Image (cartoon, rainbow, N blue to C red):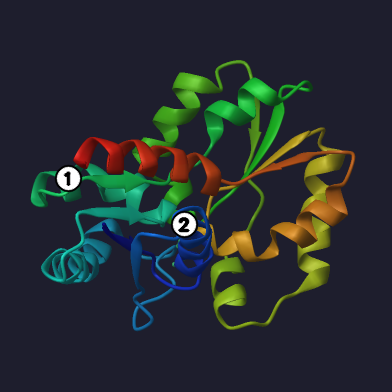
Amino acid sequence: MKIGVFDSGVGGLSVANAIRQALPNDEVILREDRKHVPYGTRKPAEIFKFVVPIFQELIDSGCQVIVVACNTVTTTLITDLRQKFNVPLIAIEPMVKPAAELSKTHIIAVCATLTTLASPRYAQLKQDYAGSTTVIEPDCSDWAAMIEEERINREAIKRMVEQVLVAGADVIVLACTHYHWIEAEINRLAKGRAVILQPEQATITQLKRELARLG
Ligand code: DGL
């Protein structure tokens, strides 16, 4: 089966690597939008115009399913994209539900782009699943660009981790696939004090289900 994976930039590679490892017999076609990355400070209407031709290209090259490996796209546009395209879209979105279920302090941190944090879908996730949980949203607005351009600021990452730990968070959600590349760093800094959640394994489970359905 041909699986399309899309993100604005290097977040997609992290997800594609995980899928390739889990499904070595399937073909994974990764597309990025290096021309317009980062998406996280852009408006949904603008992002829509960028992603439509790329999704079409993935479908034209034979992809039977597309993994939308971009929280910014899914939280703002997944409904419009599902209406427009006829292939199943596997959506990666902020893991608010598992984080709230896992937290013992009832305080979680969600690291995401500004556009994701401002989206109605994210607001809905918080309303549905984090009713009695405090959600901290540290300022990660520069992180996608920082990771994309390989200028990792370890001090900034450390400051963020300390800030959310001091505030009582015991779960940190990586709600931007670019941040998967600094998961190990965050894990090391938070070790024994907070659990880090990112969606790759859950996405693969969902993808396998979809592939079985497609036969
Ligand atoms: N990796 C993307 C996400 O999951 C978007 C990062 C960006 O382009 O700002 O949100």
Residue named by callout 1: 82
Residue 120 or 203: which is nearer the viewer?
Answer: 203
Is residue 162 in view?
no
The location of residue 122, given as percent across then percent down, is 43, 38
- Counting the numbered discs, the total is 2
User: Furthest residue to the top?
Assistant: 132
- Residue 83 screen position, x and y as percent: 11, 44
Residue at 45% from the left image edge and 38% from the top image edge? 205
Could you say which is closer to the camera, residue 83 or residue 31?
31
From this viewpoint, is residue 36 visible? yes
For the point 39% across and 38% down, which residue is it?
Answer: 206
Q: CA distance from mark 2 to mark 1?
A: 22 Å
Q: Which mark is residue 19?
A: 2
Q: Earlier in the sequence, mark 2 or mark 1?
A: 2
SS of the residue at dot 2? helix
Q: On screen, 109 above or below 29?
A: above
- 10 Å neighbourhood of mark 1: few (<14), some, or many (≥20)? few
Q: Nearer the viewer, residue 69 or 117?
A: 69
Q: Residue at x 55, y 75 (%)?
A: 145
Q: Where residue 65 sits: x, y (%)?
A: 24, 52
| In the image: residue 213, left or right of residue 28 | left
Give the residue displayed 78% in from the left and 43% down from the top.
164
Relative to residue 181, is residue 19 depicted above or below? above
Tell which tag, 2 or 1, sits nearer the viewer.
Answer: 2
Location of the C terminus (image quadrant): top left
Do callouts 2 and 1 mark residues in contact (Cβ within 8 Å)?
no
Q: Which amino acid lies under the numbered mark 2 shown in the image of this protein?
A: Ile
Horizontal arrangement in the rendering, residue 22 relative to residue 75 (left or right): right
Locate the N terminus by quadrant. Answer: bottom left
Query: Between residues 37 and 30, which one lies in front from this camera angle?
Result: 30
- Amino acid type at circle 1 is Arg
